[in-house]
Amino acid sequence: MSLWLRWSLCFALLLPVQAQSRDLQTQVEGIRSVSQVKGQLKGLLESQKECGVGICVDALSTGVCDLVGALDIRVDGKIIGEASGFTDKVLPITAPDLKLMKLIWSQCKPTNYLYTNYPSVVHVGYNPSAKAAATVDKALKVAP
């Protein structure tokens, strides 16, 4: 294999990783407050109830976990416990909000049962128990 071909393959394999890093950085930097995230979560959960099946549910359930993960970075790893040091702009989070975000994150589970299933991608989706869903919906005032 030529040196040029090796470099081309390495570059092609790194592009998706670099794009994901930029997307994550943009998402994290776009978070201005916990209240903002709570509003976005409410919108995602209400939309998920409206769409009901397939790729729509998958995208929204993944979006819930992505958003809580991004918030974890902004609150210096207080939700998940591993995302500290990524940002200098640490946001405050109240004890009730922290408890809610930890509950939501605990319902984010790896799965291989998705409408769009790519074997090279780890899928994580918000798949709450009935009790957790009721608690989260009530806390975020999600419409039934």
Image (spheres, rainbow, N blue to C red):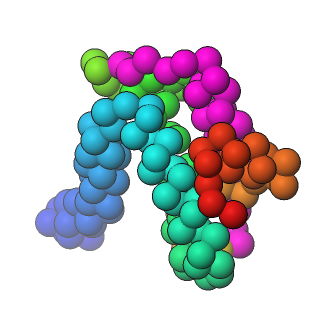
Residue 20 higher or lower than 90, as above or below: below
Q: Residue at (49%, 58%) from the top-left corner?
A: 43
Left or right: 53 as drawn, with respect to 8 = right
Q: Quadrant of residue 54?
A: bottom right
Label tally:
0
User: Quarter-wise, where is residue 37 in the image?
Assistant: top left
Q: Position of residue 57 (x, y in %)?
A: 60, 72
Q: Position of residue 6 (x, y in %)?
A: 24, 63
Give the image quarter of residue 50: bottom right
- Percent x, y for residue 93? 49, 21
Please report the residue visible at 49 percent of the width from the left and 31 percent of the height from the top: 72
Viewer-nearest residue: 138 or 28: 138
**What is the quadrant of the C terminus in the image?**
bottom right
Q: Is residue 100 above or below residue 48?
A: above
Q: Position of residue 95 (x, y in %)?
A: 61, 18
Res. 56 in view: yes
Q: Residue at x 28, y 41 (%)?
A: 30
Note whether residue 70 is visible. no
* Residue at left offset 75%, top offset 43%: 135
89 relative to 63, above or below: above
Magenta region, residue range = 90-113
**Furthest-left residue in view?**
4
Q: Is residue 4 above or below residue 131?
A: below
Q: Tell whether 46 sits left or right of 13.
A: right
Residue 92 lies in the magenta stretch: yes
